[in-house]
């Protein structure tokens, strides 16, 4: 049996616990982006968060899911020394519990990792989302996702996959922008 030897109901229970914890205490969430959902907000509003480390280059990406209204701005700080490392990863936004929990778990997984390690985790998470609830046929890949494995259930619902991937796409874009700024 995959999923760390868990039954379907065990995985569902763990999923609910991760979602509830992320809703109460989202990791990496800060308030720095304009609230684009408010009536008075200008959709052209730009935010710039400076790097908090002098040896890092920042990158930022705003993601929006028009299907459900989830949105997040992801700010990544990538070290200037090789191997490039994600030294800081924070986000601001709002949305459904799936998007918020996925962002929280993503921060826990990729902050402090090299860019290559973070991109590999993003690729593994994408494969999980493509599994249609079956999970991955690779125990090592499943273990690398740690709490992220609970999103296996989300992959059964095509309309919810975008919610789970919102932050991951933003992280990849923010890191790419930070790397491009180094050139």
Image (spheres, rainbow, N blue to C red):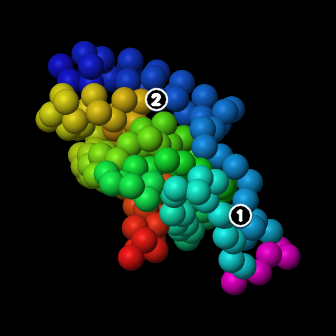
Q: Nearer the viewer, residue 179 or 3?
A: 179
At label 2, counting other C-alpha atoms closer than 10 Å, the crowd grade (few under 14, some 14-19, many 20 or more) is many
Q: Nearer the viewer, residue 162 or 31?
A: 31
Q: Are marks 2 and 1 in contact (CB under 8 Å)?
A: no
Residue 5 is labelled as: none
* Residue 7 quadrant: top left
Residue pushed farthest left? 137
User: Disc 2 or disc 1, which is closer to the eye?
Assistant: 1
Queried whether the magenta region covers residue 17, the answer comes back as no
> Which residue is under mark 2?
15
> Which residue is under mark 1?
33
Q: Is 76 above or below relative to 12?
A: below
Queried whether the magenta region covers residue 40, the answer comes back as yes
Query: Does residue 129 appear anywhere in the picture?
Result: no
At label 1, counting other C-alpha atoms closer than 10 Å, the crowd grade (few under 14, some 14-19, many 20 or more) is some
Q: Is 148 above or below relative to 173?
A: above
Q: Earlier in the sequence, mark 2 or mark 1?
A: 2
Could you tell me which secondary element the residue under label 1 belongs to?
loop
Magenta residues (range): 39-44
Q: Is 107 above or below relative to 17?
A: below
Q: Position of residue 83 (x, y in %)?
A: 31, 51
């Amino acid at each position: 049996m995959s999923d760390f030897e868990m039954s379907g109901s065990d995985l569902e229970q763990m999923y609910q616990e991760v979602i509830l914890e992320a809703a109460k205490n989202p990791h990496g969430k800060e308030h720095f982006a304009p609230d684009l959902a408010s009536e008075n907000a200008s959709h052209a509003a730009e935010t710039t968060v400076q790097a908090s480390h002098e040896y890092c280059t920042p990158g930022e990406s705003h993601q929006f899911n028009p299907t459900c209204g989830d949105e997040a701005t992801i700010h990544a700080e990538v070290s200037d020394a090789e191997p490039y490392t994600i030294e800081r990863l924070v986000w601001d936004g709002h949305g459904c519990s799936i998007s918020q929990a996925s962002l929280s778990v993503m921060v826990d997984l990729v902050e402090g990792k090299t860019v290559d390690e973070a991109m590999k985790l993003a690729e593994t998470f994408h494969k999980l989302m493509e599994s249609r609830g079956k999970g991955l046929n690779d125990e090592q890949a499943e273990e690398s996702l740690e709490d992220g494995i609970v999103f296996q259930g989300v992959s059964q619902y095509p309309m919810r996959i975008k919610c789970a991937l919102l932050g991951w796409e933003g992280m990849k874009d923010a890191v790419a922008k930070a790397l491009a700024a180094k050139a």
